Structure formats: structure tokens, C-alpha cells
Amino acid sequence: MQPNPEKKPNRLIKEKSPYLLQHAYNPVDWYPWNQEAFDKAKAENKPIFLSIGYASCHWCHVMEKECFNDLQVANLLNQAFVCIKVDREERPDLDAQYMAVCQAMDRNCGWPLNILLTPKLNPFFAASYIPKYSRPGLIGMMDLVPQVMQIWKGQRAQLEMVGADIKSRIETMEKRTPQKQLDREVLQDAYDRLTLEFDDKNGGFGTAPKFPRPHNLLFLLRYYARTGEKNALAMVEKTLTQMQLGGIYDQLGFGFHRYSTDAEWLVPHFEKMLYDQALMALAYTEAFQATGAKRYVLAAKEIIDYALRDLASPQGGFYSAQDADIEGEEGKFYLWTMDEVLDTLSPADADLVVHIYGLKQQGNFIESGKQNGKNILHIAESLEELAPYKGLTLEELIACLHNIRDALFEARKKRLPPATDDKILTDWNGLMVAALAKAGTVLNEPKYLETAMKTADFIIDHMREDGVLYHRYAKGERAVEGFLDDYAFFVYGLIELYEASFEDMYLQAAAALTKTMVTKFWDDKNGGFYQTQSSGAAMPRMKQLYDGAIPSGNSVVLHDLLWLSRLTNEPAYDTMVAQMTKIFAQEVEGAPEAYTFFLSALDFLIGPSYSVTVVGDLKEKDTAEMLNALRKHYLPSTVVALKQPSKAGLGYQQIEGKATAYVCQNQTCLPPTNSLMLMLEQLGRKQEKH
């Protein structure tokens, strides 16, 4: 590698994105995604080298060190291309479009994502990580760039045709034909397929690598609630338990790493993403509602407390992620050698750590194919079995473990911490608002609800202007007009916040933003929501449905519309829901296990689903008791609203001056009642739960 001795900044120095700023001193003549770069490519008749990544991406860091910070590679890139760097989290629209290009080319797609484009923005090459020098099965920059330059000189017209053909293929893929309405058979099919994919030994689905994918668990919890199928709940419980015991979970500082490289949840990629914390907190909270098991309360609280400690912005809102790498070493902050443990703890406590956290002298973290004495902490032995072996009661062992964990955590705090990607994203914060609101009420943690309100208020005050949401806030600046996910996820958070607080302002904000979202993204002709208001990449507009690491915008919108149609009595939303279930039916029926958040909303639509309107005053004890009775039960297909007695309107009176529930099942309304027992019976539940 030829390092960059001058360290002069390039154009990225003027950007706000932490990822782009990481590349601001590369010798590559980087441009951000803008018209200046496109004009230069046309004027100089050069292809464009587009590189997409994100701040906490390990292989993005590797490629920067190996290629973008290397003078030899940089000189080649600058000579051959106009180079553009994009933060996928800041511009998810571009990332989605060019990921579709990569997939259309049948490449191995991931991040970093590198695309070659003609000056007319026709893509003709795609690759993920590219090393400096070629390896077996992997071309390096030193060979790739000269080859592309040669082809560009002699076969430019063919490359334009390749790009046009790829765009045409994507456009064809985006054309959908409405099918019949989806029915409960697709829910059964999804359950059956998840059962086949389930890892009975380790929990989770499929083999390595394993992502958390909490929306699979949320779907299975709803399936269990509707059918009583105990295996659905068993899959959820096994997965949640094994993940919390594994190395994918930070045993000292809490919170989940992005994914596990193995089937056992032991060796993670160490970056921590805000969306994982939000969705996993939701999964553990709902698992507690469904089972009453207190261990899920502890897990949900630990995840949220991690986010409050390490990702919360003092202004309000939450930062995006924490990095995997420290000083170029992945996981360095989280790994332990035996000597480090012995230097921190007494011999007796260190002996316990070896057993509990599965430490080995040679290490359990393999780096570059070698064991190097470094260990990932994970719960390796059952505490119930270990306690008598150590001559302790279970309670004594747990207390001892807490003290040990605190001591190791304090020692770890002295290390150089992982970098925090401090941009605030509206969509991911929407998920966090939802998690905080639900956990705040279900787990009886008022500070979580207060933080949910503070976060929602921050988004409304700082990332909304004239009814329009913005996607990114960084260094005091909001930028990038919001995409579908920003509206969908934030509306989802506002709905959960309304049902937790019954502050009408949040319901009004959700309804207003939904109207804007429909205007900007709804396809009037065929139904479904586009990801972008217009294509900013000379690419076809796309409707994303696949529920990957996070749910798709369309899946979350389906949930939003169903809830808002009940809460605001807007019949147009039911019409849109029907169109969505038809236009996406073919995709969902083909692989229902890939659309589990969408299916969770469909579960509500198929029913039975319920609406409960409580007429009462939040300050009164009987109203609080009625709402608490609802929250103690797992009622994922129930929408709850609150009306003040003085403002309830015609048809909503209290019985005998007491808090009164008006329950409707599907389109049938049942007699109002002020009896908790009768209300729960109307909802198919019993008063005694946990």
C-alpha cells in the first residue's frame, strides 16, 4: 500500500455525513452525488465510479484502507473515472436502486457496493468489496481499472446498451399485475416455511450468517395469538433466548450487534445499529406480553438502556450506529484475553468468568483463520447447573455475575470506544419511538415513554417543515427530503406513541403525515407506494416490499393504514389496503417468509381484529385500570383509542359515570361495558393473565 502523505481534503470535507467525512482525506478525487459530478463525466467523457457504503461497515473500512487511501489506486481511479461516494443510510433511495442493479447482474451484492456507470448514468458493472490486487475469484483494482479503460475506449456503445438493458429489466420487474385478495392460507404457508427453516438447536432461521430479523418473531407471536399454535411461540422463545446468550449480544454493555457470522450466534459482525435495538426491544416486549416471562422484561430494558446510554442525542433523537472497528481491528473494543480478565478480577471471580462467559486461553475469536487468544463473551454454561458446582445458590451466583459484569464493563470503558455515527435518521428514529412507547407502558417504565415523546417532538420540530419530513439530521443541519420509509416508520412510531400516551397531537401528526405520504408516494394507477417521490438516479421508481434487516416501507404502511382507518375513520385507507394486498399478492405468495412484517398487518386485516374506545379521564383510577388491563394482555390485533367524557361526542357515554369500553370486532360493535371482565371477554381474553 502506498499511503497518502499529504492528507489534503477532497470535496467530501464539506459534507455532514460521518461516512462521507471518513473519506474526506482520501487521495481519491471524490464527489458527493450531485450535478457537478455528472457534468464533469459528460464533459470529460469518463465513466463514473460510484461507491456506496456506511460508517459502521467493516468491509467498507477495509476497502478504504486498502484502495481509497492508497496513492497508486487513487491515481488510477482519478485518471479513469469521475468518482462519487454515497452514504447508503443518508441516501437509501440510491442504495436501493443500485442494489437492484447489482442483483440484476447476478452479482454477490453487499457493502461496499461499487457500480460503474456511463456519463448517461447507465450501469455496466457491479461488485462488492474489491481488493487492491487480484485474488483467486476476485479481481483487484490494479487489474480492473486498466481493463475498464480499455473496454471504454473500444466498446463504449455496447456498455451503454448493457446499462439500458439492466434498467429495462428492473423496470419489467417493477411491473405488477393485481391478483386475488390474499387470505389466511398465506399466513399458514409462511408459518410452515419458517418452521422448515427453523434451527432447532440454536434458534433463528437458516444457517450462517444469521441476522436477528425480529419481524419474523413478531409475525410468529401474532400467529400464535390467533391460532394458539404452541410451536410458533416455541420458535420465538428459543430464538430470543439463544440470541441473548450468544456473542451477538453485548454481554457487558448490552444491545445487539448487526448479525452473527455463524449459526450459533457466537461470532458477530460487531457494529450496532439503531434499528436492531428498536425492533429487538419490540420483540422482547411482545414476548413478555404473550408469555409473562420476566426474563424478556430484563432483555427489553437492557437493550433500551444501551440505546439511551450510547445512542441518545442530547437534543432529542437517536444516533444511527456504533462502529465495528477500533484502530482497524474488528471487535477490538469487545474482545477479552485471559490476561485482561485476570488483571481486572480476583482469581475466584476470574475462574467464574471462564465458566460463565466461555473463555479459552487460545481464544474463541478466529481472525484471518487463526486463533489469537481473544474471546467473545457469551453465556456458555447454564447458571442453574453452574451454581451448585460452585457451592452457590442461583441467587448468589446471579448477584456475583452482576458484580463481575459491572467490573468488566468499567474496565472496558477505559478502552478507546467505537466511533458513533451521529447522524439522526427519521425512519430509524420512528422505529425507536415505537419501541420506547410500547415498552414504556407494557413494562411500566415512564422514562421510556418520556423519551419516546422527546424523540417524536424532535423529529416534528427539527425534521419537518411545511408538513414535509426530512430524512437526515447531522451537525445541526437537516437535509435530504424524506423517503417512503421516513413517513411510514415515523407514522408507525406516532401511532404507538398515541396508544401509549393518548396525546391527541401525535395522532393528528400521524394523520397529517400520512396524507402527505399518500400524495408523494402512492401509485394512483396500480396501488402500492413508491420508495421515492421521483427517481433521482435516472432509474425506474421502485416499490420495495422485501422485509430484510428492517421491514419495507410498504409493509409498515399497510400497518399504518389499517390502524389509522380505525382511529380516524378514514374509509379511503381501507380502499388503499385492499389495492396493496392485490398488487403485492403474487410476490407474497411466492415466498411469504420474506414478507413477515407485511403478513403481520395482513393478520390484522383478515381478523378477527378489534377496536376499543375507552371513554374516561386518564387522571381517574378506573380509566387507568381499564387501560392497564388492556396492556397486560397480548392483543396485537386490537386498536385502542381514548375519548374524554366531555368531548366523546354522540354515541359515546359513560355507564354510571365510570370508565366505559366500546368494543368492536371487525365491523360489529358490541354493547358498551364498564366491567373489565366483560371487556376482556369481548376481546376473547380472560382477566387473569400472569
Image: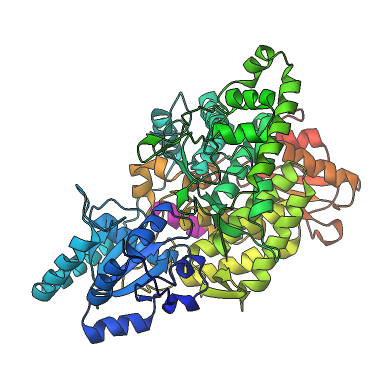
Relative to residue 6, is residue 514 drawn left or right? right
Work out whether residue 1 or residue 499 is closer to the camera in this orientation and state it.
Answer: 1
Above or below — where is 392 with respect to 505? above
The reply to whether residue 357 is in sight is: yes
Q: Which residue is outermost to the left?
A: 154
Q: Which quarter of the picture shows residue 592? A: top left
Q: Quadrant of the N terminus?
A: bottom left
- How is colour applied across the structure in the image? rainbow
Give the x, y percent position of residue 316: 69, 64
Q: Position of residue 410 (x, y in %)?
A: 69, 43
Q: Is residue 463 above or below residue 142?
A: below
**Which quadrant of the structure image shows residue 408?**
top right
Q: Is residue 230 above or below residue 329?
A: above
Q: In this view, does 687 lie above or below 527?
A: above
Q: Is residue 204 magenta?
A: no
- Of residue 605 and residue 478, the one placed in the foreground of this image is 478
Residue drawn 86% across the image and 60% down it: 646
Q: Where is residue 364 in the image (x, y as percent from the top left)?
A: 46, 31
Q: In this view, does 505 lie to the left or right of 179?
A: right
In percent of width and height, residue 56 lies at 48, 56
Q: Which residue is drawn at 50% across and 27% down?
A: 361
Q: What's the magenta bit mostly, secondary-structure-wise?
A: helix
Residue at left 89%, top 52%?
619
Give 313 or 165, whichever is nearer the viewer: 313
Magenta segment boundaries in residue numbering? 575-582
Question: Does residue 639 appear in this view?
Answer: no
127 lies left or right of 409: left
